[in-house]
């Protein structure tokens, strides 16, 4: 039978995985059947099961990282850091569950007690992206399992092999197969899963466009939890840096890690007009040193290809549009190989351009915006419907406090890259970047719901007002 789903290595074109799309309804039904036994276990039982999962991943870490590199094109060193994040997510999620959803009991009058405990939602769907095909869905799956939910996970159709490997690790750790289900497929399977009446919620990481569509789809089902972790059009403000080389390194890391395929990647570089040339020249020289190569090359590259040729084509179209609207290239977005999705890191001044679209260019393109003063820098940083990440490099503590107070974003850094969000803190954005369900450390909040109980050890009740006196005789 001819396979209808194929994954290829973007660096070489070789086939990595092939298979047929799954049945969303069948996977949800299997998860629903397994849910009661899993939810009935204690949190400590489930935590130990997830610790076994971390050990399984640790045992296979090199093979896992190699697969991620082959399927996404990201450098091997970067794939290894992703696998490390998968392992570390377990202990972080255990700590988060204990801190965010503990049992609380308060003594009340007449020996009553008020207790707050948490219950799992039930069956949760998880839709994963291709840029971090293990770490990002794992960031939903692990806290969902700890809370007692069953999960149906659909990986991106561009990274099915990584999704399959991740689910296999859960099962090898002894987590029942029904508790973590794998649904392979494309947009049709994703829509079917999101619309299945048997799910109790959906946890999504991906584009703002897809997130907006899901928000509409869930508008008539307020009883279902919807957690959206979406993209960003993220500003990096560099202002009077004392160390140009360090500032340039932060700009390069912010814009070009993962070939720019990070939701927290810097898309705009905001600088002081008239003072920017030394900084821009330093960044351009560093760009010229960036190694763009296949994931296992030696020396290791800083960037690999983007995910596929269609993505590279679209990025080139967006680049041409920037130039047509008046952008002035400083370093061009070149395609070294026509048949492979390699792109060189690009830098373009769009200060005098007109009608630049407020969209996430999900690739290695950094747009320079020159402004007259720091207030104008903050205004430029906020000139977006998105609000995921922002960073200030340079300036004073007072300027950072001003930046923090006025910039609209869920991650606001100082003298650090835009893409430096830690897993032991909440992660999420405002505007088109999310729906106020931050993930990472706060994922525990959307994986369980609180139940309040008022408890008394004996039955006591009386009605003091509004009843007739039983001793009075009616006329």
Image (cartoon, rainbow, N blue to C red):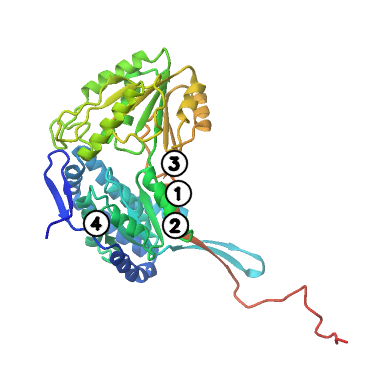
Where is residue 420? Give x, y as percent: 36, 36
Q: Quadrant of the N terminus?
A: bottom left
In the rendered structure, are the residues bearing label 1 and label 3 in contact, judged by CB atoms less than 8 Å apart? no
Q: Residue 49, image x and y in percent?
A: 30, 61
Extreme residue in the right direction: 475
Q: Give the position of the C terminus as an image quadrant.
A: bottom right
Asked whether 472 or 206 is in front, the reply is 206
User: N-terminal of the two: label 4 or label 3?
Assistant: 4
Spatial CA distance of label 4 from label 1 is 26 Å
The residue beneath circle 3 is: 432
The mark lying in front, picked from 4 and 1, is 4
Residue on which disc 1 sits: 437
Residue found at x 29% / y 52%: 187
Badge 3: how crowded within 10 Å, few (<14), some, or many (20+)?
many
Q: CA distance from mark 1 to mark 3?
A: 12 Å
Give the mark, 1 or 3, whose residue is nearer the N terminus. 3
**Residue at mark 2 to residue at mark 3: CA–CA distance:** 18 Å
Q: Tell me, yes or no, whether the two marked residues, 4 and 1, touch with CB atoms within 8 Å.
A: no
**SS for tag 4?**
loop
Identify the secondary structure beneath mark 3: helix
Q: Nearer the viewer, mark 1 or mark 3?
A: 3
Label 1 sits on a secondary structure element that is loop
In this rendering, would 416 be left or right of 219? left
- Relative vertical location of residue 63 with respect to residue 189 in this rendering, above or below: above
Question: Which of disc 2 and disc 4 is earlier in sequence?
Answer: 4
Observer-side mark, 4 or 2, equals 4
Task: Give whichever of discs 2 and 1 has the lower sequence position.
Answer: 2
Disc 4: which residue: 184
Q: Locate residue 410: give its quadrant.
A: top left
* Residue placed under numbered mark 2 in the picture: 225
């Amino acid at each position: 039978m001819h396979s209808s789903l194929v994954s290829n290595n973007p660096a070489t074109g070789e086939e990595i995985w092939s298979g047929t799309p799954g049945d969303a309804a069948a996977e949800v039904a299997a998860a629903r059947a397994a849910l009661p036994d899993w939810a009935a276990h204690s949190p400590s039982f489930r935590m130990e099961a997830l610790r076994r999962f971390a050990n399984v991943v640790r045992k296979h870490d090199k093979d896992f990282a190699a697969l991620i590199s082959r399927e996404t094109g990201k450098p091997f060193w970067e794939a290894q850091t992703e696998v490390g994040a998968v392992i570390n997510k377990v202990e972080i999620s255990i700590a988060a569950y204990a801190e965010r959803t503990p049992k609380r009991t308060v003594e009340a009058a007449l020996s009553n007690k008020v207790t707050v405990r948490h219950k799992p939602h039930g069956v949760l769907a998880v839709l994963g992206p291709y840029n971090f095909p293990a770490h990002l869905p794992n960031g939903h799956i692990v806290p969902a399992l700890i809370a007692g939910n069953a999960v149906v996970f659909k990986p991106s159709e561009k990274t099915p092999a990584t999704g399959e490997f991740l689910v296999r690790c859960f099962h090898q750790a002894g987590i029942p197969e029904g508790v973590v289900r794998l649904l392979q497929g494309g947009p049709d399977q994703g829509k079917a899963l999101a619309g299945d009446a048997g799910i109790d919620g959906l946890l999504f990481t991906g584009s703002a466009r897809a997130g907006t569509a899901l928000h509409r789809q869930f508008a008539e089902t307020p009883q279902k939890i919807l957690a959206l972790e979406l993209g960003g059009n993220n500003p990096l403000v560099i202002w009077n840096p004392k160390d140009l080389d360090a500032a340039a390194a932060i700009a390069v890391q912010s814009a070009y890690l993962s070939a720019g395929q990070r939701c927290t990647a810097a898309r705009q570089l905001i600088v002081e007009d008239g003072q920017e040339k030394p900084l821009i020249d330093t960044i351009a020289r560093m760009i010229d040193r960036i190694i763009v190569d296949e994931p296992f090359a030696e020396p290791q590259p800083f960037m690999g290809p983007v995910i596929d040729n269609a993505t590279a084509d679209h990025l080139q179209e967006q680049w041409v549009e920037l130039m047509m609207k008046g952008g002035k290239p400083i370093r061009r977005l070149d395609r070294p190989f026509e048949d492979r999705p390699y792109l060189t890191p690009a830098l373009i001044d769009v200060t005098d351009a007109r009608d630049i679209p407020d969209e996430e260019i999900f690739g290695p393109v950094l747009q320079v915006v020159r402004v007259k003063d720091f207030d104008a820098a903050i205004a430029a940083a906020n000139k977006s419907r998105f609000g995921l990440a922002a960073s200030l490099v340079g300036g004073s503590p007072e300027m950072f406090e001003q930046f923090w107070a006025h910039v609209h974003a869920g991650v606001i850094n100082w003298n650090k890259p835009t893409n430096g969000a830690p897993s032991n803190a909440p992660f999420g954005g405002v505007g088109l970047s999310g729906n106020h369900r931050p993930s990472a450390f706060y994922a525990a909040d959307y994986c369980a719901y609180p139940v309040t109980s008022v408890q008394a050890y004996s039955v006591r009740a009386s009605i003091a007002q509004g009843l007739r006196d039983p001793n009075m005789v009616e006329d």
